[in-house]
Image: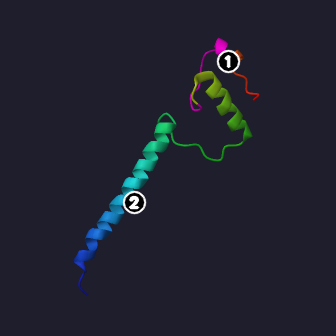
Amino acid sequence: MPVPWEALVPFGLVTTMFAAAGTLLNVTKRAQNNGLPPRYNIDDWDQMMMDRDERLTGHFRGQSTEPVAPKEFATNSAWY
């Protein structure tokens, strides 16, 4: 049975579009997370630590190694 060559062009376009969409989605997710893969299955403890890290560093994926918190940390309370 002969191959319908005219069907390969749309098939290639659809495959390319799916690959491009997946790649762009991955790039945008990593760009929002400082180049790290996204987090899954976040429980309450992880959410609390991410809120604390955001208050310390300004980004929810940032972590600080300083033993003393900055002076702004005292005024940006976790209680809303």
Q: Residue at x 73, y 27 (%)?
A: 78
Q: Secondary structure at mark 2?
A: helix
Give the amino acid type for the residue marked by disc 2 in the picture.
Phe
Residue 16 within the segment the image draws in magenta: no
Q: Which kind of residue does numbered mark 1 sit on?
A: Phe
Taking 37 as reference, is 13 above or below it? below
Q: Which residues are magenta?
A: 60-72
**Dot 1, how many residues are within 10 Å of its Cα: few (below 14), some (14-19), or many (20+)?**
some
Reply above or below: 57 against 48. above
Which residue carries the number 2 mark? 18
Q: Nearer the viewer, residue 33 or 79?
A: 79
Kindly indicate the quadrant of the structure image that contains residue 16.
bottom left
Is residue 16 positioned above or below 71 on the image?
below
User: Main SS type for the magenta part?
Assistant: loop
Taking the magenta stretch, the answer to whether it contains residue 65 is yes
- Residue 41 coordinates in the image, percent (x, y): 65, 47
Looking at the picture, how far across and down is residue 15, in whole percent?
35, 63
Decide: marks 1, 2 in contact (CB < 8 A)?
Answer: no
What number is the disc on residue 73? 1
**Left or right position of 16 against 54:** left
**Point 23% across, 84% down: residue:** 2
- Ranked by sequence position, the earlier of labels 1 and 2 is 2
User: Which residue is rendered at x = 67% and y = 18% of the image?
Assistant: 73
**Residue farthest to the right, as pictured:** 79
Between 79 and 29, the one lying in front of the other is 79
Residue drawn at 49 percent across, 33 percent down: 34
The crowd level at tag 2 (other Cα within 10 Å; few <14, some 14-19, many 20+) is few
